[in-house]
Image: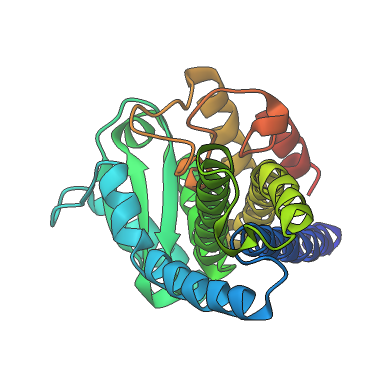
Amino acid sequence: MVAMANFFDSAAENRRNSYLLMLAVFIIAFAALYGFSLIFFGNSVLGLALGIVLSAIYVAVAYYASSSIVLSLCGAREAGKGEFPYLVNVVEGLSLAAGVPTPKIYIVDDPAPNAFAVGTSADKSSVAFTTGLLSSLSRAELEGVAAHEISHIKNLDSRMATLAVVMVGFVAILSEIGLRSMFWGGRGGSTRGRGGGLFALVGLLIIVLAPFAAQLVRLALSRQREYLADATGAQLTRYPEGLASALEKIGKLGSKVQRASDATAPLYFASPISGLQLLSTHPPIEERVKRLRSM
């Protein structure tokens, strides 16, 4: 009963933290939009309203096209019929236990052991596993990793991660356009010649700081969702050691995937790129293992 309480407590805590961080991403995106509006339209309600409408269209298109884009960027191919029957069996069983539709299964031909889930809803999701992961883990370890990825689908992490990536990308685009306008064209749009210098300066300050703030929040959000998926995955298999052992093995073998990028890194089971921990998309493997073994 104590272990079960730990599962639910860990999941609830990480959900709360994740929602707060996601709210912060939206606030930063709105601030960037407001700064962009100040540069191009001054303190104009009409300009801000137009920016909101155009931004909503961009975010919607990018969001719903994201899954196919991610799978293509990662070099994932759909698993052939009968190619990995034991993997199909594991994914189907865990999906049934989690109460979600069985996701499509993809394979990434890469020697590094890793995996990821992607999708904007539970019934439109996919899970991908590298050939390195399939060849290096035991069945119990593979079940732990698969449970983690299916937990991302169950918890709607893939949707949240996709939305976060789109919003952060949106902030970066606004910042790039605003900065180019300020430094190459003098001052943006309708702020010229009508005392809009102060508005432009405030807008410039916002769009300079917003991308950095958005990226830091996105990374923190990604780390929280990894803890949540670990807790939910352990609850799903009732065997935290399988997932803990998989993490330890992957930590020793290395999880750097050749076709991973900053944009796709938050989706992976273990960090597929190297970098400072503050700028990492994942918590330290040692801390994840410690939490799992305390459940």
Instruction: Find the residue positioned furthest to the front.
Output: 193
Quadrant of res 68: bottom left
Q: Residue at x 61, y 39 (%)?
A: 281
Q: What's the image's color scheme?
A: rainbow
Q: Residue at x 50, y 75 (%)?
A: 56
213 lies above or below 82: above
Quadrant of res 182: top right
Q: In the rendering, at what x and y percent does residue 162 appear?
A: 49, 59
Q: Residue at x 65, y 49 (%)?
A: 218
Question: In the displayed structure, does residue 212 sit left or right of residue 168?
Answer: right
155 lies above or below 270: below
Q: In the rendering, at what x and y percent does residue 193 appear?
A: 65, 58
Q: Is residue 238 visible?
A: no
Q: In the rendering, at what x and y percent does residue 19 appear?
A: 74, 66
Quadrant of res 120: bottom left
Nearer to us in this view, 30 or 146: 30
Q: How many marks?
A: 0
Nearer to us in this view, 14 or 159: 159
Q: Residue at x 68, y 52 (%)?
A: 221
Nearer to us in this view, 147 or 124: 124
Question: In the displayed structure, does residue 215 sit left or right of residue 96?
Answer: right
Question: In the displayed structure, does residue 259 sit left or right of residue 75?
Answer: right
Q: Is residue 192 visible?
A: yes
159 lies above or below 82: below
Instruction: Find the residue positioned furthest to the left.
Output: 81
Q: In the rendering, at what x and y percent does residue 105 appear?
A: 29, 57
274 lies above or below 26: above
Question: In the displayed structure, does residue 123 sit left or right of residue 85?
Answer: right
